Image (cartoon, rainbow, N blue to C red):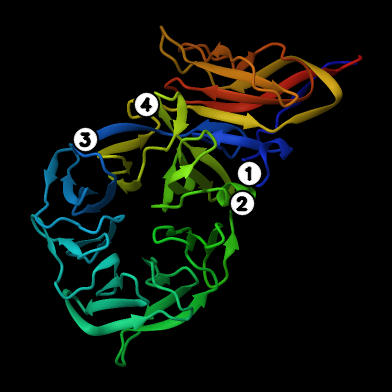
């Protein structure tokens, strides 16, 4: 029988709603990369360290009057375009929770579970002693809004006076009797209040005694305080059934059917957050992270990218050099400013850029893992080849890409490495040779060098056993 080249299903994203051994026709892992529009795989951006704040706790980012703002360990810092850091903390942002920001036009407001803090001039100060202790703060059409901790109520300031609060200026979100745990103001001016059982929309109304009125509710709650975001004219959140869902109005749609089992297995949702939109390399993503969840490598941190256009998932990882294993992706927040995307790490601020494919000082492993591919009564893989962009190295050095194979469900064999070429070496086909005989095969394709990867195709040349 004539040998023939058989393509691997690189046009698929990951499927994680079954055990890996049960998956057919999809990929089972895409790490630090994404499926591009042409059906190949590209590598995700790396992180260049821009600022070291000298602290070790998570950094949360925003901007104010042309400067990047970083909140870390309660301290507030201003960073200009030359990355000069100024500590502007007089009043720290207390509460110990994730910092939520809001802009009023003259203030940058910050809440993390205690007093709302504002930055208006040179340093931070308490917004008002009459404002509630709050985990979330927002601003809409002249009113500052704050969620009262462990209650069904949200408060608002006077119109145009963010520092004036009347204890009677409050509303209860109580279509479902659960506490308000999240707050989002959409670009359309809708006030969305989320609890574990439902999401309620309030809107500004003119005239009458009250400046806000309830309009409708969504029959799906927000699982945790920081897993509600907005992108592409819709709300996105993780609901109480551990599903990623989105809704442009009252009716929500599941986006996570392909990874339902993966989300169900998350064993620790503490401090989980959604960051969106995240637009890089012409792609449009939403980022979901459960920083303390146990991942498939036994370390902590599950970080997922959802491609909003192609409707598929991939994973982001950092690297633990002591364990030689993937671990939590270093980011705790991201923010777009100066036509750059910044990422808040542990006491550090990074730029997310395709100029590097390291995560700060640590390596970034790009990896694609296929499902088991059956070959009937068995076959011999006489050759395996990749079509990949090459020649991105220097005149003196080249990076490598590597492949290994698991046959009949056994552990993966040794890596076979081939060069991605020095500058000018443009031939795109790499042949890795034979991988023996078996009834089922699965492959891993990986790169750990600091280089871009654009994988266009992967194929096997096989012949059935007995021919």
Q: Secondary structure at mark 2?
A: helix
Q: Earlier in the sequence, mark 4 or mark 1?
A: 1
**Residue 260 badge:** 2
What kind of element bears circle 3? strand
Q: Would you place residue 253 above or below residue 419 in this image? A: below
User: What residue lies at 39% left-to-right and 58% top-to-bottom?
Assistant: 226
Q: Earlier in the sequence, mark 1 or mark 2?
A: 1
Residue denoted by label 1: 16
Separation (CA) of disc 4 from disc 1: 27 Å
**Where is mark 3, residue-wise?**
52
Mark 2 and mark 3 in contact (Cβ < 8 Å)?
Answer: no
Quadrant placement of the C terminus: top right
Q: Is residue 10 above or below residue 280?
A: above
Q: Is residue 362 left or right of residue 405?
A: left
The image position of residue 374, as x and y in percent, is 80, 29
Residue 247 in picture, x, y percent from top left: 53, 65
What is the CA distance from the residue labelled 3 to the residue labelled 2? 37 Å
Alpha carbon of mark 1 to alpha carbon of mark 2: how far? 7 Å
């Amino acid at each position: 029988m004539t040998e023939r080249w058989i393509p691997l299903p690189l046009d698929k994203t990951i499927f994680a709603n079954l055990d890996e051994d049960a998956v057919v026709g999809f990929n089972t892992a895409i790490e630090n990369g994404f499926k591009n529009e042409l059906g190949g795989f590209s590598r995700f951006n790396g992180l260049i360290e821009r600022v070291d704040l000298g602290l070790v706790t998570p950094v949360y980012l925003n901007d104010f009057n042309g400067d990047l703002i970083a909140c870390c360990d309660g301290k507030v810092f201003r960073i200009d375009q030359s990355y000069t850091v100024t500590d502007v903390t007089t009043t720290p942002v207390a509460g110990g929770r994730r910092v939520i920001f809001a802009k009023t036009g003259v203030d940058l407001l910050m809440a993390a579970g205690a007093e709302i803090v504002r930055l208006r001039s040179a340093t931070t100060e308490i917004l008002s002693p009459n404002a509630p202790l709050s985990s979330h703060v927002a601003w809409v059409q002249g009113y500052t809004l704050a969620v009262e901790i462990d209650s069904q109520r949200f408060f608002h300031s006077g119109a145009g006076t963010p520092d004036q609060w009347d204890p009677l200026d409050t509303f209860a979100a109580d279509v479902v009797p659960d506490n308000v745990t999240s707050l989002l103001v959409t670009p359309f001016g809708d006030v969305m209040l989320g609890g574990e059982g439902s999401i309620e929309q309030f809107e500004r109304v003119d005239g009458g005694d009250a400046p806000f009125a309830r309009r409708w509710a969504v029959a799906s709650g927000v699982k945790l305080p920081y897993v509600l975001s907005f992108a592409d004219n819709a709300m996105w959140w993780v609901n109480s059934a551990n599903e990623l869902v989105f809704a442009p109005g009252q009716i929500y749609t599941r986006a996570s059917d392909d990874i339902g089992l993966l989300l169900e297995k998350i064993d620790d949702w503490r401090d989980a957050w959604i960051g969106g939109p995240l637009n890089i390399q012409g792609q449009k993503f939403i980022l979901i992270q459960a920083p303390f969840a146990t991942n498939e490598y036994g370390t902590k941190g599950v970080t997922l990218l959802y491609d909003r256009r192609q409707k598929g998932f991939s994973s982001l990882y950092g690297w633990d050099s002591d364990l030689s294993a993937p671990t939590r992706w270093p980011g705790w927040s991201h923010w777009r400013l100066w036509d750059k995307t910044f990422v808040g790490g542990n006491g550090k601020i990074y730029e997310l850029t395709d100029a590097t494919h390291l995560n700060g000082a640590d390596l970034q492993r790009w990896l694609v893992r296929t499902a088991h591919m059956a070959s009937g009564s068995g076959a011999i893989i006489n050759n395996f080849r990749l079509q990949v962009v090459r020649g991105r190295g220097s005149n003196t050095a080249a990076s490598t890409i590597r492949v290994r194979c698991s046959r009949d469900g056994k552990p993966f064999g040794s890596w076979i490495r081939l060069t991605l070429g020095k500058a000018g070496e443009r031939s795109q086909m790499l042949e890795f040779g034979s991988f023996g005989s078996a009834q089922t095969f699965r492959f891993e394709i990986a790169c750990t060098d600091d280089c871009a990867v654009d994988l266009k195709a992967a194929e096997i040349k096989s012949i059935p056993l007995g021919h």
